[in-house]
Image (tube, grey):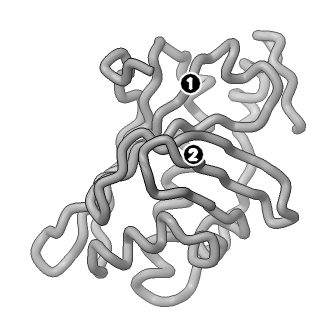
């Protein structure tokens, strides 16, 4: 995979009162991720070429991918493929990068979602609504020990755009 072809489509930066090591653990631990990722668990083999998997609360495969870059505790880049038929085939692969930097007494966490082709705002609306909720809940858990209660569902405009492209979704 030539990651040089991928261009950022979504970028979010948040500041968390934590340490790089704790943020790294939160991003890469199944047990910790269940707390802020609305019951979903992240399973990651922390080596280039290792598996990256997100499972729903009932254990079903939701997202699969591969570790592209792993620089503990500073940077993790993975392919991020939602387990919906035809999605990757028609929309191309997605790369997600988390960059963790010490920023004084806090940690600056930047999430970058990159694509190898242009996608419509309707398609990108899923990530643009999902990532802020996930990152906000991560921040809350790390700072207060309590996740946010956010209703998560793909935006209807994204589902309509996928349907128009002939991509079946479970929604």
Q: Residue at x 79, y 49 (%)?
A: 61
Residue 17, horizontal then vertical, whole percent: 29, 80
Q: Residue at x 58, y 49 (%)?
A: 52
Mark 1 sits on what residue?
93
The residue drawn where x is 67% and y is 54% is 54
Closer to the chain start, of discs 1 and 2, is 1
- Tell me residue 137's x, y (percent): 53, 70
Mark 1 vs 2: CB contact within 8 A: no
In the displayed structure, 129 sits above or below 87; it is below
The answer to whether residue 45 of the structure is visible from this angle is: yes
Residue 111 appearing in the image: no
Report the quarter where the N terminus lies: top left
Q: Residue furthest bottom?
A: 145
Callout 2: SS: helix
**Which residue was labeled with disc 2?**
129
Q: Quadrant of residue 85?
A: top right
């Amino acid at each position: 995979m030539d990651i040089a072809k991928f261009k950022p489509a979504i970028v979010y930066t948040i500041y968390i009162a934590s340490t790089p090591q704790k943020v790294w653990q939160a991003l890469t631990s199944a047990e910790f991720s269940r707390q802020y990722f609305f019951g979903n668990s992240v399973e990651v083999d922390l080596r280039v070429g290792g598996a990256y998997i997100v499972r729903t609360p009932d254990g079903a495969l939701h997202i699969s991918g591969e570790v592209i870059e792993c620089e503990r505790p500073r940077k993790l880049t993975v392919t991020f493929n939602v387990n919906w038929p035809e999605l990757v085939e028609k929309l191309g692969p997605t790369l997600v990068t988390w960059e963790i930097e010490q920023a004084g007494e806090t940690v600056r966490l930047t999430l970058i979602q990159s694509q190898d082709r242009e996608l419509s705002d309707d398609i990108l609306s899923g990530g643009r609504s999902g990532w802020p909720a996930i990152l906000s809940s991560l921040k809350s858990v790390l700072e207060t020990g309590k996740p946010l209660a956010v209703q998560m569902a793909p935006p209807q405009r994204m589902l309509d755009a996928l349907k128009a492209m002939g991509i079946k979704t479970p929604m």
